[in-house]
Image: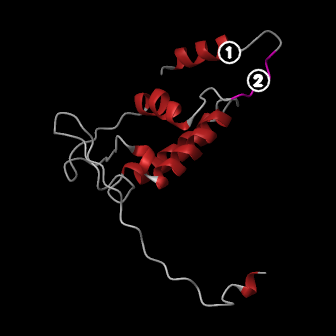
Amino acid sequence: MQVVELQQAHAERAQPGDEDDQSPLYSTVEQWVTTYLLPTFPRPVGEVGLTRWHWCEQWWRHDEAVTRLTALWYGWEQARLQMTGMLPWLRELDHQLPILYGDDGPFRNCVAGGDLGEPRHRLALEVPAHPAPENWWSWWH
């Protein structure tokens, strides 16, 4: 979505005397990802090992990705209301995109569809964790 479209959408939502409306522009993280993030910040994705960026068309199945994208969406919704709010938000986006799309990110085992073939979705293996011994956390209280 282009800036002009965002401004138009905001103007259409605003009612006279409603200048302080702080309701979200997007109703879900999925709507924000598909309507704003992916079109505004496209990255070349493809076969694992052939590109620097990885994407999964079933991104919503990756808990880490959902958590990071939701945080970015909430931050974006807040930042858009402030005069210079996008400056710190863009720094956060620049930090999160390499983590999300990177070689060690949540989509590292997935392949996006397109010219190179069919999409492939693979969840990362769960990292095992043993429970702490009894009273291990007692110092925390």
Residue 89 placement (x, y as % from top left): 59, 41
Q: Nearer the viewer, residue 115 or 86?
A: 115
User: Where are the magenta residues, as a range?
Assistant: 18-23
Residue 91 placement (x, y as % from top left): 54, 45
Looking at the image, residue 141 lies above or below residue 67: below
Q: In the figure, is residue 11 to the left or right of 91?
A: right
Q: Which mark is residue 5?
A: none
> In the rendered image, which quarter is residue 6 located in?
top right
Q: Nearer the viewer, residue 138 or 18?
A: 138
Q: CA distance from mark 2 to mark 1?
A: 9 Å
Looking at the image, residue 7 lies above or below residue 26: above
Picture residue at 48% right of the left edge, 22% below the top: 1
Which type of secondary structure does the marked residue at label 2 adopt?
loop
Is residue 22 magenta-colored? yes
Picture residue at 59% right of the left edge, 12% below the top: 8
**Quadrant (top left, top right, bottom left, bottom right) of the C terminus:** bottom right
Residue 55 placement (x, y as % from top left): 34, 44
Is residue 49 magenta-colored? no
Q: In the figure, is residue 96 to the left or right of 75?
A: left
Q: Where does label 2 land, which residue?
A: 21
Looking at the image, tell me whether mark 2 or mark 1 is earlier in sequence order: 1
Dot 2: few (<14), some (14–19), or many (≥20) neighbours within 10 Å? few
Contact check, label 2 and label 1, Cβ < 8 Å? yes
Q: Give the amino acid type for the residue marked by disc 2 in the picture.
A: Asp
Picture residue at 60% right of the left edge, 15% below the top: 9
- Colouring: secondary structure
Q: Give the amino acid type for the residue marked by disc 1 in the picture.
A: Arg
Q: Where does label 1 land, which residue?
A: 13
